[in-house]
Amino acid sequence: MPAAPNRRAVAAVLLVPLVVTLALWAFSWPAARIAPRDLPVGIAGAAPAADQLQKQFERREGAFEIHRYEDAAAARTAIEERVVYGVVVVTEKGPRLLTASAAGPVVAQLLTEAAGAGAPDGSGVPVTDVVAAPAADPRGSALGASILPLAIAGVAAGAAVSMLGLRGARGAVTLIGAAALVGIAATALTHSWLGVITGDWWTEAGVIGLTVLAIGAPVAGLAALVGTPGIGVGAMLMVLLGNSFSGVTSAPEMLPDPVGAIGQWLPPGAGGSLLRSVAFFDGSAGGGPALTLAAWALLGIATVLAGRRTRPEPAADSAAPGGREREPALAG
């Protein structure tokens, strides 16, 4: 048996378990280590009751990042602007909790349990959902599940541009057009039909389209630089790491360090955060994710515009199909 096929067979045998192991690690490890890590929460009210409540939260070292507010009005504003996930307000009748399930139902449940831990036995803490998740998706399951299809769509667009040999302006226009159509189709499905996102329709379509472009353009750019292997590298970066590190099903601050931060620098995580902001919070705290997506999209488009063809140009007609030079035609 020739040596080259043997080497390819060995490479395939080793590569498949490696990819599977990487996929299991990327998806299972963050999910198995979900816990608050510097999770931004607020405490509102006058001392000393508010000070005592803050000490209660600080007992879980490294779990919460405490913000102090004077009253419930300031606390509501902080939640609506996505500065904090929730605020415990100290009142004369006892503490009450302000949450935003639209920012993450998992976090809202966690804060409810944390606030109720200090309550007397048999009594609960009243909870007010300042920005509630839509009735069609109260647990945020649909929003969390939407990032993987968008990542696949972006990789597919980048792979198609590469495999079809589209480079330069033609490749860039194809990527932008495909991303725009995905944004429109996905918004029609999630907003108009399912009702799981409830913001401005065209803004949501733009965010989804930008997310797909920020994934597809780098994949096509990598393929333009290194050839077909670039598609695989881009797929692993965007689907395996980007999707599993996005934190969209819980919150970036609920993932192990530095997974949460890495996820927000990748398009799936930034796209999920921006979509949540425009869908439920009128775009609050969306500037950073928008810049991240724009940077990835522009870098990918620039690479596609400047990248070389992955396949060499055919040689000039100086050689015949058999490899022998053609004899010059004899003059009449």
Image: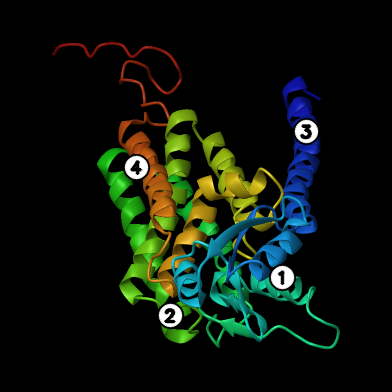
> Mark 2 — residue?
198
Identity, as a three-letter code, of the amino acid under mark 1: Leu
First along the sequence among labels 2 and 4:
2
Q: Nearer the viewer, mark 1 or mark 2?
A: 1
Q: Give the camera-side residue of 89 and 26.
A: 89
**Residue 105's spot in the image, x, y percent?**
63, 74
Splitting the image into 4 quarters, where does residue 310 fall?
top left
**Distance from label 1 to label 3 (Cα)?**
49 Å
> Mark 1 — residue?
110
First along the sequence among labels 4 and 3:
3
Q: Would you say 10 lies left or right of 186 here?
A: right
**Distance from label 1 to label 2 (Cα)?**
24 Å
> Mark 4 — residue?
298
**Residue 260's spot in the image, x, y percent?**
63, 50
Q: Tags 2 and 3 in contact by the CB under 8 Å rule?
A: no
Q: Residue at x 82, y 82 (%)?
A: 120
SS for tag 3?
helix
The tag on residue 9 is: 3
**Distance from label 4 to label 1 (Cα)?**
38 Å
Q: Give the camera-side residue of 259 and 193.
A: 259
Q: Would you say 313 lies left or right of 239 here?
A: left
Residue 178 visible at all: yes
First along the sequence among labels 1 and 2:
1
First along the sequence among labels 1 and 3:
3
SS for tag 4?
helix
Q: Give the camera-side residue of 138 and 38.
A: 38
**Distance from label 4 to label 3 (Cα)?**
39 Å
